Amino acid sequence: MSQTNDRTENEQPAAPTESVHRDYVLDVRIVELTTGDDTVYRFEAPHHAGLEFEDAETAELYADVYFDVNGFEEAGTGERGVPPEIIQAGRDTLVGYFLTQPSVDVEWVASYYGEKPEKIQRYANRVRKRATEIREGVAERNVG
């Protein structure tokens, strides 16, 4: 029997398993998808195409940016575009958004803005804090 990619011809790739990594208010969540040894985290929200991230922390920051600007859509922004809601929200929100993009890290953003990495982390932490406050407010009002 011949083998292809370390599997016999009769073997099927592992079916992905899906579980909720984090459930937020207003029908927003992060879903963990695992296929074999690979795991990705998909952000899901109403009226938002689900994006996948390699790690949970980045997906959670993306969710924080989403709440910080009261939602946004990626559709129509192009491959290098930024949704207008994020541009209008200010530097800290834009920094948080940049940090969720592929191949972008704290050092890249710090270089882009001419700031120290510590300041970039503070910007991202502000977004996280505001998003937490927004979600708590929604939960207290039983809105979502």
Image: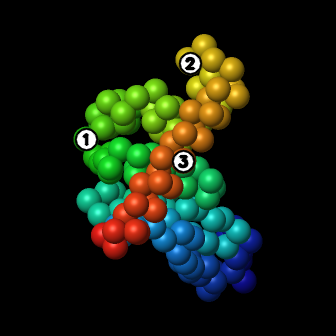
Mark earlier in primary sequence (1, 2)? 1
Give the labeled residue for mark 3. Answer: 129
Mark 1 falls on what kind of element?
A: loop
Q: Residue at x 46, y 62 (%)?
A: 136
Crowding near the residue tagged with mark 1, few <14, some 14–19, many ≥20 C-alpha atoms within 10 Å: few
The amino acid type of the residue labelled 3 equals Lys
Mark earlier in primary sequence (3, 1)? 1
Q: Nearer the viewer, residue 7 or 1?
A: 7
Give the labeled residue for mark 2. Answer: 112
Mark 2 falls on what kind of element?
A: helix
Crowding near the residue tagged with mark 3, few <14, some 14–19, many ≥20 C-alpha atoms within 10 Å: few
Rounded to the nearest whole Å, what is the CA distance between mark 2 and mark 3? 23 Å
Residue 143 appears at what percent x and percent y?
30, 70
Q: Is residue 102 visible?
A: no
Q: Nearer the viewer, residue 62 or 2?
A: 62
Q: Is residue 14 visible?
A: yes
The residue mark sitting in front, 2 or 3, is 3
Residue 18 appears at what percent x and percent y?
53, 77
The amino acid type of the residue labelled 1 equals Gly
The residue mark sitting in front, 3 or 1, is 3
Mark 3 falls on what kind of element?
A: helix
Q: Residue furthest front?
A: 140
Q: Is residue 115 left or right of residue 129?
A: right
Is disc 2 in contact with disc 3, using a CB cutoff of under 8 Å? no
Residue 98 appears at what percent x and percent y?
50, 34
Rounded to the nearest whole Å, what is the CA distance between mark 1 and mark 2? 24 Å
Q: Residue at x 45, y 36 (%)?
A: 93
The amino acid type of the residue labelled 2 equals Tyr
Q: How many marks?
A: 3
